[in-house]
């Protein structure tokens, strides 16, 4: 199979790609179970790229139950180096409006019932996460978006557990914390992608004003009103982005796991090695003694 290096994960409203040829659909079983669905290999801008619908084709997986580890592990296994996450988000700022796009550069984690690491059993690794998004990929994404939408460069995304939207008090608190947009899915995806040394950037497409405005509280109906236009623009942006990703990566994401694993090789058993092989094989030797 030809090496595929770019993938995108589609969020709410983004279940397929119009006017594209699906070359193949791959079913991958991972040590963390199956991904959200089949990974489609599609031809876009004269290249083959991978696409995964985050919530499943019928949107039947809630944010708290997304198989984020299986999704990232599967993409790593097929050789993905750069990943764009497309998400519907709410605005926490006066200057960010529905049908705008935001390419965030920071995250605040308000999730509490998701496993957020591959290293949860007998190995320990502490990755750097001060800058949670790949700057290089985010810059390409900003360039690719400018002709299609009103794009905001940078911003802090608050990630909540969901599936209910925020209360008004929470929404106003997140504003005071410096939050600019709010979503439910960028974590643990961004952390897992970093552990997997995959560049990760977010194309956040705004659908609503969350719950901080007195007379404008988010509802699924309000979100749906802006989805169609956002999805059309999102698809154009991805097509525009692909030719910008021809050069090899020069960012630090590709070595993010170097010097972070503090468990001694000798104590990594064959079972744990096999479970994490796609993630750790560059750094850890299998210990066949235990
Ligand atoms: Zn990167």
Image (cartoon, helix red, strand yellow):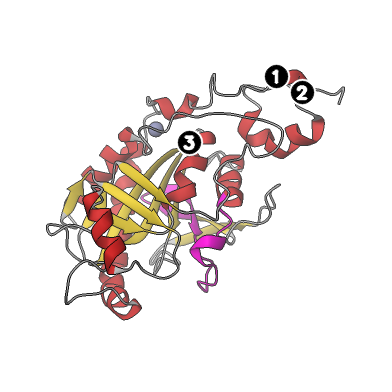
73 is within the stretch colored magenta? no
Mark identifier at residue 267: 2
Instruction: Name the N-terminal-most of marks 2 and 3.
Output: 3
Q: Secondary structure at mark 3?
A: helix
Task: Using residue 53 as the reference point, say whether residue 122 is left or right of it.
Answer: right
The segment highlighted magenta reads 42-68
Instruction: Name the N-terminal-most of marks 1 and 3.
Output: 3
Q: Residue furthest left?
A: 95
Q: Residue at x 31, y 46 (%)?
A: 241
The residue tagged 1 is 264
Mark identifier at residue 227: none
Q: Quadrant of ligand 1?
A: top left
Cα separation between marks 1 and 2: 6 Å
Q: Position of residue 91 (x, y in %)?
A: 23, 61
Q: Secondary structure at mark 2?
A: helix
Q: Secondary structure at mark 1?
A: loop
Cα separation between marks 1 and 3: 21 Å
54 is within the stretch colored magenta? yes
Q: Is residue 90 visible?
A: no
Say few, some or many: other residues with alpha carbon within 10 Å of mark 3 (under 14 / 14 to 19 / 20 or more): many
Q: Quadrant of residue 10?
A: bottom left
The residue tagged 3 is 194
Q: Residue at x 17, y 63 (%)?
A: 97
Pointer 1 and pointer 2: residues touching (CB < 8 Å)? yes
């Amino acid at each position: 199979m030809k090496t595929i290096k770019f993938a995108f994960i589609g969020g709410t409203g983004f279940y397929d790609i119009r006017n594209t040829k699906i070359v193949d659909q791959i079913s991958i079983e991972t040590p963390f179970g199956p991904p959200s669905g089949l990974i489609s290999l599609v031809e876009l801008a004269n290249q083959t790229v991978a696409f995964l619908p985050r919530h499943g084709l019928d949107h039947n997986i809630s944010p708290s139950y997304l198989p984020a580890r299986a999704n990232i592990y599967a993409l790593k296994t097929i050789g993905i180096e750069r990943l764009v996450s497309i998400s519907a988000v709410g605005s926490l700022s006066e200057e960010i409006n529905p049908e705008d796009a935001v390419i965030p550069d920071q995250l605040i984690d308000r999730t509490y019932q998701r496993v957020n690491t591959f290293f949860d059993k007998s190995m320990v690794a502490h990755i750097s996460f001060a800058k949670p998004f790949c700057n290089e990929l985010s810059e390409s994404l900003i360039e690719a978006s400018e002709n299609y939408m009103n794009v905001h460069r940078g911003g802090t995304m608050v990630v909540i557990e969901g599936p209910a939207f925020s209360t008004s008090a929470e929404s106003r608190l997140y504003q005071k914390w410096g939050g600019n947009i709010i979503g439910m899915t960028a974590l643990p995806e961004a952390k897992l992608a970093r552990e997997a040394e995959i560049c990760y950037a977010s194309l956040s497409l705004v659908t609503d004003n969350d719950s901080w405005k007195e007379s404008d509280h988010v509802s699924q109906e309000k979100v749906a009103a802006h989805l169609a236009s956002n999805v059309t623009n999102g698809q154009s942006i991805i097509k525009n982005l692909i030719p910008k990703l021809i050069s090899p990566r020069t960012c630090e994401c590709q070595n993010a796991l170097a010097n972070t694993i503090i468990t001694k090789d000798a104590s990594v058993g064959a079972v744990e090695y096999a479970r994490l092989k796609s993630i750790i094989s560059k750094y850890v030797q299998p210990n066949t003694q235990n």
